[in-house]
Amino acid sequence: MSECPTCHQQTPEGTFCVRCGAPLDRELDHSHERHEYAAAPGQRRYAPWIVSSLFPQLPRHSDRHFRVALGIGAAIVVLLGVLRLFPVALITAALLMPLLTALYFYDVDIYESEPLWTLTWTLGWGAVTGVAVGIFTKAVAPAGTALIDRGSTYHVVTGGILVPLLGVVLMLAGPLVLLPYRRFNDPLDGAAFGSATAAMFAAAEAVVIGVGVLSGGLRPAGAAAPWVARLLGVAVATPVLSMSAIGAATAAIWIRYRAPVKDHGALGLFGSPPVAILTAAVLVIAGAVSETFMPAGLWLAWVVVLDAIGLVLLRRAIHVGLLEEEAEKEIGPELRCTNCGAMTAGHTFCGNCGIALKALPKVPEGLATAEGEPAPHRGAFAGRLAREVQGRPTRRRRLIAFGAVAIVTIGAGFAIGALAAPPPRTAPCKLHNQCGSPPVLAKVLTTFPGFTPWTSQALGYSLRFNSSQWTIAAQDASNLTLQAGDGFSLLFVNAAPESQYSPRALAEQRISSLQGQLLGWTHDTNPSDALLGSAVGLRPGPGGVFVGTVSSPQGPQTPVSVAVMAAGDGRVSIVVTAVAPGNNPGDKAAVYQRADDIIDSIEWAGQ
């Protein structure tokens, strides 16, 4: 026995004090200052590693398996995105972290006698509230011009601030129900409950929000690179942010109300429950609101930075919670540490590797150690864990289980995408082949009842529209925006003097603007959607058909089809943009037909 230079208590010879966890080769003001992370001594305490932070009760041999599973899952999501199997990739991405969380609970709780309802409650509460918030978000989704304007009040305030704030409140509410139960008195319990709830909440919300994407078929059109960045956000970046932020807040609450009084102030300012909750809300909101003004790749990088902050806060709370000193507790009989396999005195920390024994799975009464004796202490080298460290095949079971569930998940994604896919279409018309009636002169159509005329006060061009099908959403002296009765489809008519913008320059400006608003913006290569002739006011000009997806801070949302056409008369350049549903061929055709009627009705000044 020797005296620990930090806590000044008697401890067996070794590398770490079995009472306070401080290294025996140097003196610290407090064991909290040790550089080694209490749940994984091979790592620095503030290194933002995902697995050891979100799943701290894993021995190091299990930790490796989870890191492999996380890497394989992320790689599968990227591969599906590169292959443009976006619906399948979205389902797989959304379920990646919940799958790992459920596997973690199984791996840890298999040694416990705690009731199954704790797992059911945390994961179930996250799933139910995530679905509810997803449905609410879709119910208050914007209509008209705000739909494709990421800088609109809805996307910034509602989607970027209010909905995430509601999510934080609900994610915290579920774990706090378990706070009064004395059997859950460790900060690790609070961190685990908060992280599990957040994982399921993020997954359920993303799936509900992405229902529109699922109905676009197995391989909807879209550029792969932005989609891959967004899918990695759904799979890893966003759930890790929520899990770390909520887990840090719940761990701080557990330390304040369930730890010994002397440890209540161990986290300092961030240990105050109001500050911890506010910090969690700020992190989650910062990740959501930034999606409204950042490109997909830059947004992903920003969320990774927020992830690092959240993980450090979570690790700090776990580290402090595990280093609660138990100096007055008597040293028990020796046990073989599950983490390193060395013999250590039964107390609070392993004297060889320094891991907090609370950070290891519990051992039920009566389970034998590797030596055949009853397991005397939590963290003992016993049961299946003993066989795993000895290299027996059971160590691969969790990877096999993960792979099996992943295959089922991907298969379900393929099935959903195939069932929801629209029927194949055959183009009714082909380029250079007449298949319809010639357009009727706009001058005659303006006399029809039920049509509303509109004239640009600044540039003199005019048009008319069917007031039973369209309403004016916005207008000024040069431009007009019409909204269809479905609340979704739009027609933008924008004009400028040709001395300032040629028709092509005006069209390119419009396309560039829309590219920044819609996820996966790219040309529509489907022959059934081909633009057979680009003309505005019966004058030819540049144009094209494009596809993209409306993306909210909560995830990819709704596919859209966009036709852009421009023309000029030597004095005025006009660009017309028609926005239609991207996953319903019948509705899209109807919108484009009605839009084409308005485009043909345009009369140039002096015509």
Image (spheres, rainbow, N blue to C red):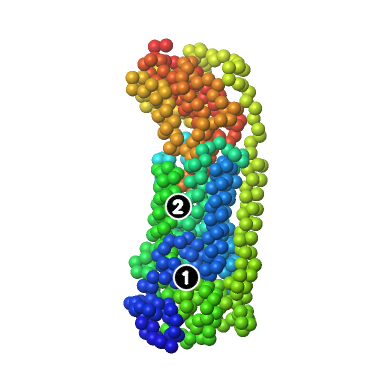
Instruction: Please indicate whether residue 323 sits to the left or right of residue 178 in the image.
Output: left
Q: Is there any visible trace of residue 136 in the rendered image?
A: no
Nearer-N-terminus badge (1/2) = 1
Label 1 to label 2, Cα distance in Å? 30 Å
How dense is the environment of label 1, judged by Cα within 10 Å: few (below 14), some, or many (20 and up)? Answer: many
Dot 1 falls on a residue whose secondary structure is loop
| 384 to 502, vertically: above or below | below
| Kind of residue indicated by mark 1 | Ala
Rendered residue at 45%/65% (across/down): 250
Residue assigned mark 2? 164
Q: Position of residue 103 (x, y in %)?
A: 59, 63
Residue placed most toward the observer, 539 or 379:
379
Quadrant of the image occupied by residue 481 = top left
Q: Position of residue 264 (x, y in %)?
A: 39, 73
Q: Which mark is residue 39?
A: 1
| Kind of residue indicated by mark 2 | Pro
